[in-house]
Amino acid sequence: MKRVLALLFILSIGHVFAENIIIAVVNNSAITYKSLEPLFINANSKDHKVDIINQRINDILQVERAKELKIEALLSDVNLALIEISKSNNISLEQLQTYPEFLSLEEEVSEKISILNLQRYITKDLTIDEDESVKICSKKAPSIVKQIKIAQIIISKVEAQNDQDIAIKAFLEKLSKHISKGASFESFAKLHSQHSSYFNGGMTDWIEVNNPTVEMLDSLKDNEVSTIYMTDFGFAIGIKLEERFISSNLKQCREKLIYLKAEKFYSKWVSELREQAYIKIYHDAL
């Protein structure tokens, strides 16, 4: 059916392109030599021209799919981009609009934004396993930092008639003695901690060892309860759970890994998009 539609499309508009050779058809869109002529100027071979045509085919297919998903460029986004272009060229938007090439520029900007919206939509759920990223990034980076994961029982207030600080510390010392004798730190954290981490047994995310308090916690032996220390949420006791050494640029490295994964995934997705489309390149016209 797509082949028939493409043929009907060519026949119905043939007179319009009488002076402009059609070099490719993708679904119901024709690509003319004139539309790609500026790009062909630097093409040093026929294969190079075919590569340019294929890229144009990919663009058309992506814009079509963006429209189907209703995530094509909004007029407001296009206008903002055009304003930035005018600013970068030290002219006003009104001046930019007077240029003969403005309509082509506007269309190009709209296409690029639509494709970007599509890329974000298709790859939005891609992630990379944290342990895998730590392993890869730590090998690549020369600068390594130490992180630990701890569990804490944090108390900000207790019922007491005397000094609050003294009462809180006495309560934490009592808990510490019970834990040292075999009581479950996790259970006590869930029962007594007044921080939102209580539901997880007081366990924290990974913390970089970069200050005296964390260094003290890092020095703890297995199941050893720390001395009482101050946090932003109250006094606390803690135990050390895990440690790891990671790249100091882990965040940037992880973002790059996700980007590369998304790029590979999206490239494959575009290839599958091509397989579903009707595509015809007229090599003899090049």
Image (spheres, rainbow, N blue to C red):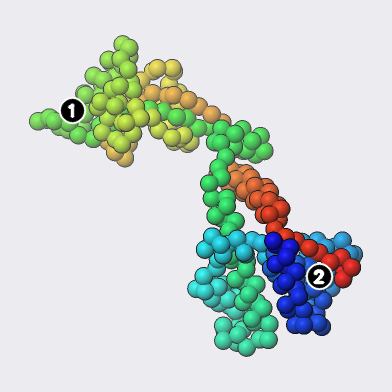
Q: Nearer the viewer, residue 191 or 74?
A: 74
Q: 93 or 17, which is in the foreground?
A: 17
Q: Is residue 154 above or below residue 5?
A: above
The residue under label 2 is 23
Tell me which residue sits at (30%, 15%) in the image: 183
User: In the rendering, which numbered label is found on residue 167?
Assistant: 1
Q: Nearer the viewer, residue 139 or 93?
A: 93
Who comes first in sequence, dot 1 or dot 2?
Answer: 2
Label placed on residue 146: none
Q: Position of residue 151 (x, y in %)?
A: 38, 27
Q: Above or below — where is 93 with respect to 249? A: below
Q: Decide if residue 165 is in sight here.
A: yes
Q: Quadrant of residue 170?
A: top left
Q: Which residue is rendered at x = 75% and y = 82% of the image? A: 16
Judging from the image, what secondary structure is the residue with disc 1 in? helix
The answer to which image quadrant residue 40 occupies is bottom right
Please state which amino acid type lies under the numbered disc 2. Answer: Ile
**Callout 2 environment at 10 Å: few (<14), some (14 to 19), or many (20+)?**
many
Q: Which of 206 and 263 lies nearest the eye of the viewer? A: 263
Q: Is residue 129 left or right of residue 46?
A: left
